[in-house]
Structure formats: C-alpha cells, structure tokens
Image: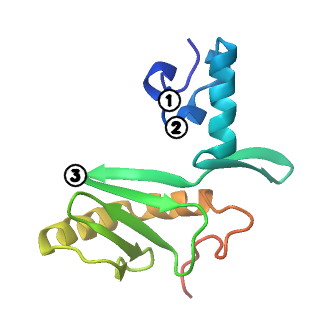
Amino acid sequence: MTNGPPKDRLRRSPFFYLVNPADLESLDEFAEYLDCLLHGQCRVEEVDGELRLIEGRQLVDRVRGLSIHIYGNEHPPPHFHVKSADVDASFRIHDCEIVEGKVGSRDLKTIRFWFKEFRERLIQVWNATRPSDCQIGEFREAT
C-alpha cells in the first residue's frame, strides 16, 4: 500500500481527493476521484510552474470538541474559524480577537490557550492555503 489516507475510509466523502491516486483500482474509483477534484472542496492551481492541490477548507486542529479551520479563499483580515455544537465564530490571526460570532467564556479560554501555543502553525496553514485569486495574501506580522 502507498502513502495517503485509506481510500475505503474516504470513499463517498468530500475528501476522496486526499487518496493517493496510485491506490485507485477501478474505473469507478478514478471517476469518483476526478469528480471530487472537479466539484469538491479543493482545486488545482499552478504555483511557480508546478501544479498544486489547494484545499477549500483546511482542518488545522481539534481541541476539546472544537474544530479549527482555515478557508482557502477568504476576505480580510486573516482569520481562522472555530466550530462545534455551541460555537461558530471566526478570530483574527493577528491577536485572536473575535471577527464574527459568539463564544462562551469556557470555549473562549480554550481557543485563546490553543492560539497562544499553536499560532505559528496557524500562520503556516494560512500561508500554505492562499490561492492565487484570494482577496488577501499571506499573513505578515505588522511592523
């Protein structure tokens, strides 16, 4: 078996494009893979003369029931999204201030603690997921 997520687990999911194409065995699997590339949460772009798969939404981490995501084509300011059963909010990457949404005090403490520990990873994911036609480019520290 080659590297990549197990195809049986991802089959018929929006993430089938993550499967290593070398693991595809049937025409149906190839068709499903192509459909996922064409209509799924990702797109293919040319970056510095090389084709790259750009995900529309990147899971950065999960902590205490919270899912932390970066979306590919976003608006200013650079921000991340936090979702759970009780939370649907976005926060600035610069300082973890709420851009939109409401969060209970317990979840807010968890998010801010996570941010303090993993801010550099968040910036790396933001910068890696900027498509060429994004309204806002890579995150840069204010000088």
Going 56% across and 11% down the picture, which residue do you hit?
Answer: 1
The x, y position of residue 5, in whole percent, is: 49, 27
Residue count near mark 2 (Cα–Cα under 10 Å), binned few <14, some 14–19, many ≥20:
some
Q: What's the residue type where badge 3 is placed?
A: Gly
Going 22% across and 52% down the picture, which residue do you hit?
Answer: 65
* Local SS, label 1: loop
The x, y position of residue 82, in whole percent, is: 34, 63
Residue 12, disc: 1
Q: What's the residue type where badge 1 is placed?
A: Arg
According to the image, label 2 marks what residue? 15
**Residue 34 relative to residue 122: left or right:** right
Query: Which quadrant of the rendered structure holds the C terminus?
Result: bottom right
Residue 143, disc: none
From the viewer's side, name the closer residue of 57 and 115.
Answer: 57
* Local SS, label 3: loop
* Local SS, label 2: loop
Q: What's the residue type where badge 2 is placed?
A: Phe
* Mark with earlier residue (3, 1): 1
